[in-house]
Amino acid sequence: MLSIGSPLATSAHTSSSCNVLLRELQQIWSDIGESEADKDRMLLELERECLEVYRRKLKEAANAKARLHQSVAAKEAEVATLVAALGELNIRSPIQTEKKMSSLKEKFASITPLLDDLRTKKEERIKQFEDIKNQIEKISGEISRYNYPNDTMINCLTLEDQDLSVRRLTEFQTCLQTLQKEKSDRLHKVLEYVNEVHLLCGVLGLDFAQTVSGVHPSLQRTNQEQSTNISDGTFEGLQHTINKLKTERRTRIQKLRDIVGQLFDLWNLMDSPQAERDGFSRATSIVRLLEHEVREPGVLSNEMIEQASAEVERLAKLKASRMKELVMKRRSELEDICRMIHIEPDASTAVEKSDALIDSGLVDPSELLANIEAQITKAKDEALSRKEIMDRIDRWLAACEEENWLEDYNQDENRYNAGRGSHINLKRAEKARITITKIPAIVDNLINRTLAWEEEKKTFLYDGVRLVSILEDYKLTRKQREEEKKRCRGQKKIQDLLLTEREAIYGSKPSPRRSNSLRRTNGYLANGNGLMTPNTPRRNSVGGATPELLASRSYSGLQNGYFKEMRRLSTAPLNFVAISKEDMVSTYTSVCDSELGSPPHC
């Protein structure tokens, strides 16, 4: 049984209605009296009209189906295109996934929401790309002449077959991040360059704003709305400016150092007070600094250099007016240096000669001063080369002083009294004995050192006399003194023996108290001033100095006075060999015959 509403039921119902209508039409025709032929003709016409209606409806239905199919296919193609552009490869068309769909309207209805969703995603993705593109174009515009390697990615957004995938978006974001980092690095680099320019301008006393404005106006930061230019041209301009400022700084440092060197020389010559020098402490501070350490603002400004130059000119004029005084002062310094190292200063610039030359106008004081300066430099070099030997001479002289003190101490009859300071003298005497034992080694070492020095340079003179001759004379004198001491000890033993025999024969008698006003010391008498004077004839030793060289040349106080005394003694040693045997016998006879006589003290 056909259900109501089904196509067959509808067709049966339509056929039944047509049959009823056809019977009514035939009855009308019969009533009218139409012939059979006319009835057949009209029935044929009616069938043709019905066919035309069916054909028209069929054509319309076919056209509708074609349009609907085309729409579905177009949407399907658009979905595929959007899926490919957005990179949504996991999305599948519902027409392909749902095979049970038979009607085109169902297909159309199922694909439309998906297409709308993909279109929305595309619009959002395009907005993201456009935003990134604008940022990239902006940063690229700020970095002029900076060739970004993926500029084609920006231009491809205008193509119809756009790649709007997440992968492509990630690439753009990566490129944007790279540009942003490059921009940040450039900003930091520009800031470093600007700070360096600011520092150099401060040191040189230049206008910072004018200097950086010459590179680019945005570097001055007067307009907050204007972004700092970070182009390659700005970098090149800043680097060129920095190099130029560094060159200027180097030139000014050298110029100021030359001026400061002249200032130091003039200050030392003029003996300028410290307060006057402190006024240029900023300028003089650069002498001990390296180039990159000069950071004080204005220390290399033109005003500072002009002030230092003006001070040099003022001191130079004052120097010209006081040249004679300066010559005498520098000559005095030369003599002091020569006195310290015991050499004779150059007689050509002596005070009397220099004074006469300056007054006569025969010599320019500046040339004379330069000559003295050269002599001072030479004397300082000489002092440096003689330092080691001079130190050993001082050590030798100190040992000789200790020896002299010990001899006086040994002759003091009250040295063992328990008075104040006696224990200190005992300790000093013990140390002096140890020091005296080292004198021969000190002298020999000093002679060897002096000879080695003379092989390299020239004759080593000490106050005009060859030091080796002085030392050899000292060794000879010391040897003779030692022999004299031994002979005195032998004489004393003989005297003691004779006195003992005399006392055994005649009995002991007290000897008168010996006078302490005069003491005999190895052939010397104490003169009351702590100096030893000879009381026996002397003769010049072989190789000793001539009497002309024994004149006073002392330049260094008591110590050198003692050394000169030793030199004088060394040139006239005791000659005990010259004492005749008759004198010896007469001495012994006088001792034996005199009851009140006392033995000589050795």
Image: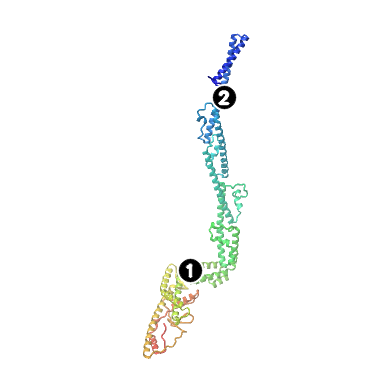
Q: How is the image coloured?
A: rainbow
User: Residue 118: percent from the left, percent from the top?
Assistant: 55, 34
Q: Circle 1 sits on which residue?
A: 383
Could one spot residue 85 in this view of the protein?
yes
Q: Is residue 152 visible?
A: no
Q: Quadrant of residue 471?
A: bottom left
Q: Secondary structure at mark 2?
A: helix
User: Where does the image place residue 457, in percent across and percent down from the top left?
Assistant: 44, 68
Q: Position of residue 544 (x, y in %)?
A: 43, 76
Whether 166 is drawn above or below 198: the answer is: above
Please indicate whether residue 221 sits to the left or right of residue 399 in the image. Answer: right
Position above or below: 489 against 17? below
Residue 45 in the image, given as x and y percentages of width and height: 59, 14
Q: CA distance from mark 2 to mark 1?
A: 125 Å
Judge depth for marks 2 and 1 and give the one in front: 2
First in sequence, mark 2 or 1: give its number: 2
Q: Secondary structure at mark 1?
A: helix
**Tag 2 residue:** 64
Q: Nearer the viewer, residue 382 or 427?
A: 427
Which amino acid type is marked by label 2?
Ala
How many numbered marks have been drawn onto this rendered protein structure?
2
